[in-house]
Image (cartoon, grey):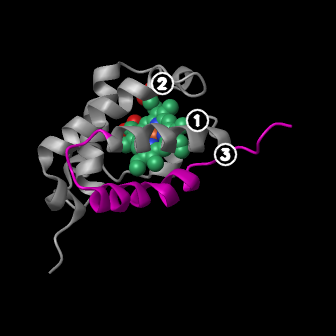
Amino acid sequence: MQPTLYEKLGADNVTLLVERFYDLVFVHPEISHLFKTDKEIIKEKQRLFLTQFLGGPALYSQQYGHPQLRARHLPHPIGNDEAVAWLACMNKAISTLPIDEPLKDELFKRFVPTAMFMVNREEEE
Ligand code: HEM
């Protein structure tokens, strides 16, 4: 069987990715205002979620139940611009990981459809 992205990355890189990603998100001019919960809680939830999203153990579901990611994002106004900003932060965070380029590409591509699926508002003119 093919190794999962989680196996290729390893748990330490998932933790590193989450740290670096939110360091960018929490200061991003377009999306930082959306994040209102305790920053450490957000990071920990994302670490649990990404572990399972990338094919590792279902840590998020064990603690919080079915992710229902789109439903959980509905209270937050996410337009195309916000999804692009989120992906830009993710791309930048991925670029800092100590992994090879093809793995960086594969990892980034994994996020694109999910981020676009979170769009829940028409862009304002
Ligand atoms: C498209 C752009 C996105 C935006 C603007 C966004 C924004 C947010 C916001 C504002 C929250 C709530 C934070 C809080 O509690 O204060 C959240 C939670 C979360 N987001 Fe996103 N998100 C996006 C895409 C994604 C994607 C692509 C993933 C996964 C691959 C993801 C995974 C999560 C998870 C796991 C949570 C925690 C859910 C929970 O409350 O248990 N998000 N996001």
Q: Is mark 2 within 8 Å of ligand 1?
A: yes
Instruction: State how far apart marks 3 and 2 are (Cα).
Output: 17 Å
Q: Left or right: where does residue 112 sit relative to residue 7?
A: right
| Residue mark closest to the camera, 1 vs 2 | 2
Q: Which residues are magenta?
A: 96-125
Mark 1 residue type: Pro
Mark 3 residue type: Asn
Upstream in sequence: badge 3 or badge 1: 1
Mark 2 residue type: Phe
Q: Left or right: where does residue 85 sit relative to residue 4?
A: right
Circle 2: element type: loop
Upstream in sequence: badge 3 or badge 2: 2
Instruction: State how far apart marks 1 and 2 are (Cα).
Output: 11 Å
Residue lying at the far right of the rendered structure: 125
Residue lying at the far bottom of the rendered structure: 1
Identify which residue is drawn at 43% across, 60% down.
Answer: 109
In the rendered image, the vertical position of residue 18 relative to residue 106, given as above or below: above
Q: Are marks 3 and 2 in contact (CB under 8 Å)?
A: no
Circle 1: element type: loop
**Disc 2: which residue:** 35
In the rendered image, the vertical position of residue 43 relative to residue 79, given as above or below: above
The circle on residue 36 is: none
